[in-house]
Amino acid sequence: MSKITLSVIKADVGGFVGHGEVHPRMLERSKELLSRSHLLVDFHVTRVGDDINLIMTHERGVDDPEIHGLAWDLFKQVTEVAQDLKQYGAGQDLLVDAFSGNVRGLGPGVCEMEFEERPSEPVIIFMADKTEPGAWNFPLYKIFADPFNTPGLIIDNKMHKGFTFEIHDLKHGTRISMDCPEELYDLLMFIGAPGRFVTKAIYSRELGDIAACSTTTKLSLIAGRYVGKDDPSLIVRCQSGLPAVGEALEPFAFPHLVSGWMRGSHCGPLMPCAVEDARPSRMDGPPRAIALGFQLANGKLIGPRDMFADSGFNKAREMANEMANMMRRQGPFEPHRLHLEEMEYTTMPQIMRRLERRWTAIPEPGETAKELIAAGKAQAQGDGSEID
């Protein structure tokens, strides 16, 4: 068999009762449209929160214009269903009107990998809602670089050489590759800042093949304003010289803190949950992650198995709720509210412009508070502000 391509393309094109879920008619329409395509070997449609995820196999390679066009046309048609049902934020991830052969930079998130199927090919598709692409940095480090999480790094001779991490700087549009374990400390310096540096792909140094790939779409950088959180997806291949399935799932037993949650402006725990429970509602959260496992067989998606439906993750969910309680008590104060650079894509710049004439110089020694207040009132004249 020729190489198989596994493509995951996702978009938020309308929320069912706010931002919590996808209406069943939208999912049905998505399945109907994919079932008509002659391009695919197989497909599976699912959702996490208010995002539709298209999991597709084909033989056309990555960045194929027809596969991307299929997804783009599907999202446009499902948007029409959302509009008919008056769903919230209908079409919100479709930021550009004209499709130009690739959905990258248009709003939808995409991760794809092309490889030759092994005798047994287990893959896990992770999908998240109410968070950003950098949310995968922590678990990917644990899976592919931390022997305390992944004993295969010690036990499996095929994993001893380690893995190469491809890191993207979303602010400057650049990338770098780092070999681990040799460059582990350098790697952590960057991926510890997940709002800017994200793990795009990981490669086995022994096998010379791709092991993981994630979406890196940053909607606010495309639109220049907040238009919804990025809600990333991730593909991880497992076993036979790659991390075991259990090693790939283990990092999610700790609900690490991620950016997103309410209005995309807060920090909270990433809660692993079954697909059935991926319906965030408390303050539109907390952020959720689901994991679907498949065995590939000649391109067919055998599955899915709902990996986080396991009761072994109950403690992680309980911990996530406790962490959510703690973070919520901080209200509008950092670190629950995101740092200022992230807030630049919310309404904060408008507030700053409205009040900019009210700011005055800090007084020199001897200048009285009364004089400072008077200066502030003078600056405020004409901007519509009132000072008692």
Image (tube, rainbow, N blue to C red):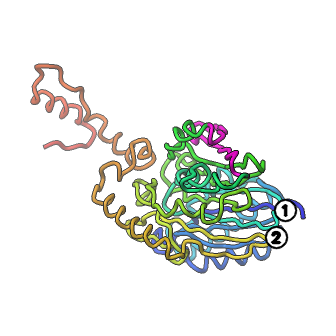
Element under disc 1: loop
Q: Which residue in the rendered view is the most extreme toward the right? A: 1
Is residue 129 toward the left or the right of residue 367 in the image?
Answer: right
* Frontmost residue, 161 versus 236: 161
Residue that label 2 marks: 41
Whether the residues at callouts 1 and 2 have beta carbons within 8 Å, the answer is yes
Amino acid type, residue under disc 2 in the picture: Val
Amino acid type, residue under disc 1 in the picture: Glu
Residue drawn at 68 percent across, 56 percent down:
111
Disc 2 crowd rating (10 Å Cα; few below 14, some 14-19, many 20+) is some
- In this picture, is 347 found above or below 263? above
- Gap in Å between the C-alphas at discs 1 and 2? 8 Å
Residue that label 1 marks: 59
- In this picture, is 53 found above or below 217? below
Element under disc 2: loop
User: Which contiguous range is marked in magenta?
Assistant: 158-182
